Amino acid sequence: MADLKAKFEKAVAESKQLPEKPDNMTLLKIYSLYKQATEGDVEGKRPGFTDMVGRAKYDAWAGQKGKDGKKAMQEYIDLIESLK
Protein backbone atom coordinates (compact mmCIF):
# COMPACT_ATOMS: atom_id res chain seq x y z
CA MET A 1 0.00 0.00 0.00
CA ALA A 2 2.86 2.41 0.84
CA ASP A 3 4.29 1.86 -2.66
CA LEU A 4 0.91 2.52 -4.31
CA LYS A 5 0.42 5.66 -2.19
CA ALA A 6 3.87 6.94 -3.19
CA LYS A 7 3.13 6.30 -6.88
CA PHE A 8 -0.26 8.03 -6.48
CA GLU A 9 1.31 11.11 -4.88
CA LYS A 10 3.92 11.22 -7.67
CA ALA A 11 1.14 11.02 -10.28
CA VAL A 12 -0.75 13.84 -8.54
CA ALA A 13 2.37 16.04 -8.76
CA GLU A 14 2.89 15.02 -12.41
CA SER A 15 -0.74 15.83 -13.24
CA LYS A 16 0.06 19.50 -12.66
CA GLN A 17 2.90 19.40 -15.21
CA LEU A 18 1.34 17.63 -18.17
CA PRO A 19 2.64 18.78 -21.58
CA GLU A 20 -0.84 19.96 -22.60
CA LYS A 21 -4.12 20.51 -20.81
CA PRO A 22 -6.45 17.50 -21.17
CA ASP A 23 -9.98 17.94 -22.54
CA ASN A 24 -12.85 18.49 -20.10
CA MET A 25 -14.00 14.86 -20.05
CA THR A 26 -10.47 13.71 -19.17
CA LEU A 27 -10.19 16.41 -16.51
CA LEU A 28 -13.45 15.17 -14.97
CA LYS A 29 -12.11 11.60 -14.97
CA ILE A 30 -8.89 12.76 -13.27
CA TYR A 31 -10.94 14.69 -10.70
CA SER A 32 -13.35 11.85 -9.99
CA LEU A 33 -10.61 9.23 -9.58
CA TYR A 34 -8.67 11.56 -7.27
CA LYS A 35 -11.71 12.24 -5.10
CA GLN A 36 -12.66 8.54 -4.98
CA ALA A 37 -9.10 7.56 -4.04
CA THR A 38 -8.73 10.21 -1.33
CA GLU A 39 -12.25 10.59 0.09
CA GLY A 40 -14.31 7.57 -0.99
CA ASP A 41 -17.88 7.76 -2.23
CA VAL A 42 -19.43 11.16 -2.93
CA GLU A 43 -21.68 12.56 -0.22
CA GLY A 44 -24.06 15.47 0.04
CA LYS A 45 -26.56 16.96 -2.35
CA ARG A 46 -26.01 17.33 -6.06
CA PRO A 47 -25.36 20.99 -6.95
CA GLY A 48 -28.23 22.93 -8.47
CA PHE A 49 -28.92 23.49 -12.15
CA THR A 50 -27.14 26.88 -12.17
CA ASP A 51 -23.83 25.37 -10.99
CA MET A 52 -22.95 23.44 -14.14
CA VAL A 53 -19.28 22.89 -13.25
CA GLY A 54 -20.08 21.69 -9.74
CA ARG A 55 -22.81 19.46 -11.12
CA ALA A 56 -20.46 17.90 -13.71
CA LYS A 57 -17.83 17.25 -11.02
CA TYR A 58 -20.43 15.74 -8.69
CA ASP A 59 -21.78 13.47 -11.43
CA ALA A 60 -18.29 12.34 -12.45
CA TRP A 61 -17.39 11.52 -8.85
CA ALA A 62 -20.75 9.77 -8.30
CA GLY A 63 -19.89 7.61 -11.31
CA GLN A 64 -16.98 6.15 -9.32
CA LYS A 65 -19.26 5.16 -6.42
CA GLY A 66 -18.36 1.85 -4.80
CA LYS A 67 -14.89 1.73 -6.35
CA ASP A 68 -12.16 0.69 -3.92
CA GLY A 69 -9.68 3.46 -3.05
CA LYS A 70 -6.69 1.36 -4.16
CA LYS A 71 -8.32 0.63 -7.52
CA ALA A 72 -9.10 4.34 -7.97
CA MET A 73 -5.48 5.20 -7.13
CA GLN A 74 -4.17 2.72 -9.70
CA GLU A 75 -6.57 3.98 -12.39
CA TYR A 76 -5.49 7.56 -11.61
CA ILE A 77 -1.81 6.61 -11.95
CA ASP A 78 -2.47 4.80 -15.24
CA LEU A 79 -4.47 7.75 -16.63
CA ILE A 80 -1.77 10.30 -15.78
CA GLU A 81 0.90 8.02 -17.31
CA SER A 82 -1.13 7.81 -20.53
CA LEU A 83 -1.31 11.61 -20.76
CA LYS A 84 2.44 12.23 -20.48
Image (cartoon, grey):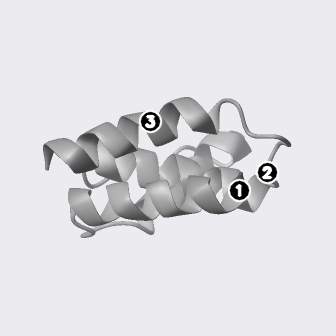
Q: Which residue is mark 1?
A: 83
In this rendering, would 45 be left or right of 21?
left
User: Can residue 55 be seen from the camera position used here?
Assistant: yes
Q: Residues within 10 Å of mark 1 (few under 14, many from 20)?
A: some
Identity of the amino acid at label 2? Answer: Pro
Q: Is residue 66 above or below residue 38?
A: below
Circles 2, 1 touching at the beta carbon (< 8 Å)? yes
Q: Residue at x 67, y 49 (%)?
A: 49
x%, y% of residue 14?
A: 59, 35
Q: Residue at x 54, y 47 (%)?
A: 31
Q: Nearer the viewer, residue 52 or 72?
A: 72
Taking the view exactly as shown, the residue that stands out farthest to the front is 3
In the rendering, which numbered label is found on residue 10? 3
Identity of the amino acid at label 3? Answer: Lys
Q: Is residue 59 above or below residue 54?
A: below
Q: Residue at x 82, y 42 (%)?
A: 21
User: Can residue 45 be seen from the camera position used here?
Assistant: no
Q: Secondary structure at mark 3?
A: helix
x%, y% of residue 56?
A: 63, 53
In the rendering, which numbered label is found on residue 22? 2
x%, y% of residue 45?
A: 39, 46
Q: Secondary structure at mark 2?
A: loop
Q: Residues within 10 Å of mark 3 (few under 14, many from 20)?
A: few
Q: Secondary structure at mark 1?
A: helix
In this rendering, would 56 be left or right of 24?
left
Q: Residue at x 46, y 56 (%)?
A: 76
Q: Label 3 to label 1, Cα distance in Å?
A: 14 Å
